[in-house]
Image (cartoon, rainbow, N blue to C red):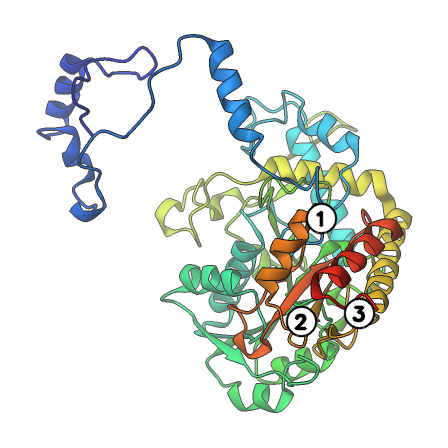
Amino acid sequence: MTIKGFKNHPYIPNSVPEVQKQMLQEIGLENLEDLHAEIPDALKLKENMALPPALAAEYELRRHIEKILRKNHSGKDHLIFLGGGCWPHYVPAICDEINSRGEFLTGYAGEAYNDHGRFQTLFEYQSMVAELVDMEVVNVPTMDWAQAAATSMRMAGRMTKRSQVLVPSLMDPEKLKAIRNYCDPTLEIVSLKHHPQTGQIDLMDLQEKLSDSTAAVYFENPGYLGFFEEQGEGISKIAKEAGALTIVGVDPSSLGIIAPPSQYGADIICGELQPLGIHMHYGGGLSGFIATRDEEAFVMQYPSRLFGIAPTTHEGEYGFGDVSYNRTSFGDLRENANEYVGTQTSLWAITAGVYLAAMGPKGMQELGETILQRVLYTMDRMKEIPGVKLSPLQSSVFKEFVVDFNHTGKTVSEINEALRKHHIFGGKDLSEEFPSLGQCALYCVTEIHNREDIDQLVNAIKTIVGKEG
């Protein structure tokens, strides 16, 4: 967009008016606004932005920015019990050390001409995630869990040549919106009813909604509200009898203590890598993975890159590279590929690989056990607060659980605002996402929360709801 008084800029290439005019003539346009003709006029800025005067020195600019940043309140200076898709976990120092190396720092997947170990690193990451989920093939990651789930559903649709996917009603609404957007118009997303007391999928409703149009049934373990879907094997059996695939979304930090979805019938597994050594970064650091069996029918439906190992022309030497590269939009198929593949979150894949290598199987088991123990302790302490209850939507939970504040006389918003005065970030307010639950909040407890932190939270809530006795 043309800015009044704007001629050329030292940091903006080709901003000299004569150069711009020549470039516009080359592509047959009159002015820069023609480049954005498809954008509705109501969305366009008609005047200059109200920017403050330029700061003359780098030092002044630095002070100005630091002053703005000091207004933020982060998980570093507050106790944080807020999860809901991006969770507070401890990030080992080695994760930041490795992913900040020059040969890894870019988010791109790398090519043969600039690879300095990246291909092998991604292969090792894939191998460790495959071992964690008990599958054989893992992709170079998507942008987040929502895209991984949506891509898994599209894979199922292409494999079965069907046009419908069944999903739980108690899903993260933001994730569900992303899935619907990504799958439209090729797949219809249909929600399944849940048991009002446990949150588990209603198997009778599942059987009624399954048809010869159903490509897959999708559920999560643990689900958005923290509880495990305990009917996984039954859901998979019902889906397979109808000719549909089973897709399971999973939090990898739980897999040290529960069976991976492959052991109760999952055909495709997807999930979020953020718990594996990735900082919260104001909502993400997010990265989604997909895993399947090593069968051609599955492999050829991956839109994303896969890295494998193969012998080279030198005896005893091995190299790492793309598997079936031509199926991607980077390869020969181009616009006829399964889906377009752009920038991947490969840096987070490398980070997750470092985390898994550092933790090992024993470490992942200890992580899961620690989280489970601290969640149970927190739930027991919450029950001590008069007027505060635990939601019945949790037969068995992991990392997150629903707290019911309906009988405290205060809204979740009021409680969370008061908690901030105690330097605590409270649970996620569910009152808008699930109005039927009333004033409920989703609380998150991980390995970073010790007994003192949890007691501080409980005592603060007691004070806020006026039920100290």
Q: Amino acid at mark 3?
A: Ile
User: In which quadrant of the rendered image does the C terminus lie?
Assistant: bottom right
Where disc 3 sits, the SS reads loop
131 relative to 469, above or below: above
Residue 372 is situated, as x and y percent measured from the top left of the image, at 84, 61
Q: Nearer the viewer, residue 344 or 68?
A: 68
Whether residue 352 is visible to the viewer of this picture, yes or no, is yes
x and y percent of residue 441 in the render?
Answer: 64, 65
Please, is residue 14 above or below residue 162 in the view? above
Name the residue that disc number 3 marks. 385
Q: Position of residue 143 (x, y in %)?
A: 53, 47
Mark on residue 422? 1
- Asked whether residue 84 is in view, the answer is no
Q: Secondary structure at mark 1?
A: loop
Q: Which residue is mark 2?
A: 405
In screen coordinates, is 435 left or right of 372?
A: left
Q: To which quarter of the image does residue 262 belong?
A: bottom right
Looking at the image, is mark 3 or mark 1 earlier in the sequence? 3
Point out the tag, 1 or 2, that comes first from the N-terminus.
2
The residue lying toward the viewer, choosing from 158 and 167, is 167
